[in-house]
């Protein structure tokens, strides 16, 4: 199953994708929130609604805005330096255990809503990543049981302001949690939809030029390891997002380095999880 949300900001409705066509399933009353991801009965209700209304589900026109595929998550936890080639290009030091950081909830945004350059930013960068959505509370789980806690997978961009991240002291979070820095979508694919999550192409183009072209085969730490490791430090609840790191090709790793600026356009995607296009926007105080 592939689920998505559509409509104006703050008024998104629930949808589903069948054979690459988008349908409105808001009539089911289902909302893609924490309760949905952690409630098998609600997921079954949606499946029954789709089955019973298969011939008359309203079609969502391609002109309609696509929002983030779930309501704002409880938390967004990310893993840094999870690809060898990315570690080498950044010049940062790989640690003996996975690096983790948390993005502010205000960074969560839709896949087509634009990425806003923060006030004072000078080194705005991209990182295409595979993320997954928790479907069952995870606390100190083993690697063997870890995938039982995953609902599905989605495309995310771990947008980063490198000067904030590396030149302003303290933790990485300063450069990771700015508004619009965690666009997710266009949809969530349930884990049954993705046959081999460890063999997916990841790519990004900047103004039409290919910058990232990697594969999840190159994970340093694979998803079961990440879930088991991270769940030692905090409980993960249904609807929480964990992002798994980015392959080489970031602006930081280029020679000379390349930084995003207002007016730039990035197009990026992951095999099986769709693609999207984002425009870089100037700072605006909301």
Image: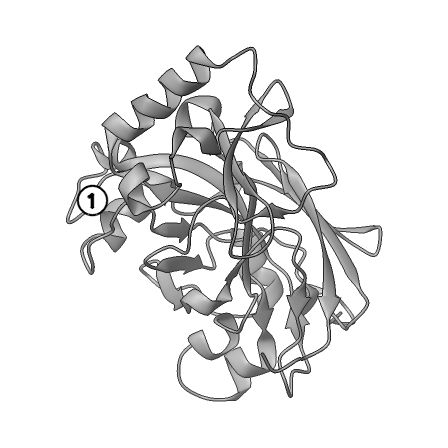
**In the rendered view, does 92 fall on the left or right side of 264?**
left
Q: Residues within 10 Å of mark 1 (few under 14, many from 20)?
A: some
What x and y, as percent, mark residue 230? 26, 54
SS state under label 1: loop
**In the rendered view, does 273 fall on the left or right side of 32?**
right
Residue at 25 percent of width and 38 percent of height: 38
Residue at 64 percent of width and 61 percent of height: 126
Q: Which residue is mark 1?
A: 137
What x and y, as percent, mark residue 241? 38, 51
Q: Nearer the viewer, residue 139 or 83?
A: 139
Determine whether 104 is above or below 4 in the image.
Answer: below
Given the current orientation, which residue lies at the most extreme right position?
Answer: 208
**In the rendered view, does 211 fall on the left or right side of 239?**
right
What x and y, as percent, mark residue 69? 50, 44
Q: Is residue 39 visible?
A: yes
Residue at 31 percent of width and 22 percent of height: 44
Q: Nearer the viewer, residue 180 or 14?
A: 14
Given the current orientation, which residue lies at the most extreme left position?
Answer: 140
**In the rendered view, does 79 fall on the left or right side of 263?**
left
Q: Nearer the viewer, residue 203 or 60?
A: 60
Residue at 18 percent of width and 55 percent of height: 232
């Amino acid at each position: 199953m592939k689920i998505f949300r559509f409509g104006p900001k703050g008024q998104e409705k629930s949808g589903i994708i069948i054979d690459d066509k988008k349908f409105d399933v808001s009539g089911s009353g289902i909302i893609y929130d924490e309760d949905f991801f952690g409630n098998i009965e609600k997921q079954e209700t949606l499946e029954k609604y789709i089955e019973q209304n298969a011939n008359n589900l309203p079609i969502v026109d391609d002109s309609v805005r696509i929002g983030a595929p779930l309501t704002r998550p409880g938390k967004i936890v990310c893993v840094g330096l999870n690809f060898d080639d990315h570690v080498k290009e950044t010049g940062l030091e790989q640690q003996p255990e996975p690096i983790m950081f948390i993005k502010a909830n205000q960074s969560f945004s839709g896949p087509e809503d634009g990425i806003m350059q923060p006030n004072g930013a000078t080194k705005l960068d991209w990182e295409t990543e595979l993320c997954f959505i928790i479907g069952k509370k995870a606390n100190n789980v083993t690697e063997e049981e870890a995938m039982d806690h995953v609902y599905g997978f989605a495309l995310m961009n771990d947008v980063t302001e490198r000067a904030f991240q590396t030149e302003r002291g303290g933790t990485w979070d300063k450069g990771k949690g700015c508004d619009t820095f965690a666009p997710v979508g266009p949809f969530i694919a349930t884990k049954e939809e993705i046959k081999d999550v460890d063999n997916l192409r990841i790519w990004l183009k900047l103004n039409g030029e290919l910058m990232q072209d990697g594969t999840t085969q190159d994970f340093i730490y694979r998803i079961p390891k990440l879930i088991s490791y991270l769940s030692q430090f905090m409980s993960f609840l249904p609807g929480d997002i964990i992002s798994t790191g980015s392959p080489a090709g970031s602006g930081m790793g280029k020679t000379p380095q390349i930084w995003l600026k207002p007016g730039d356009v990035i197009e990026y995607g992951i095999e099986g999880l769709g693609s999207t296009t984002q425009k870089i926007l100037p700072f605006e105080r909301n």
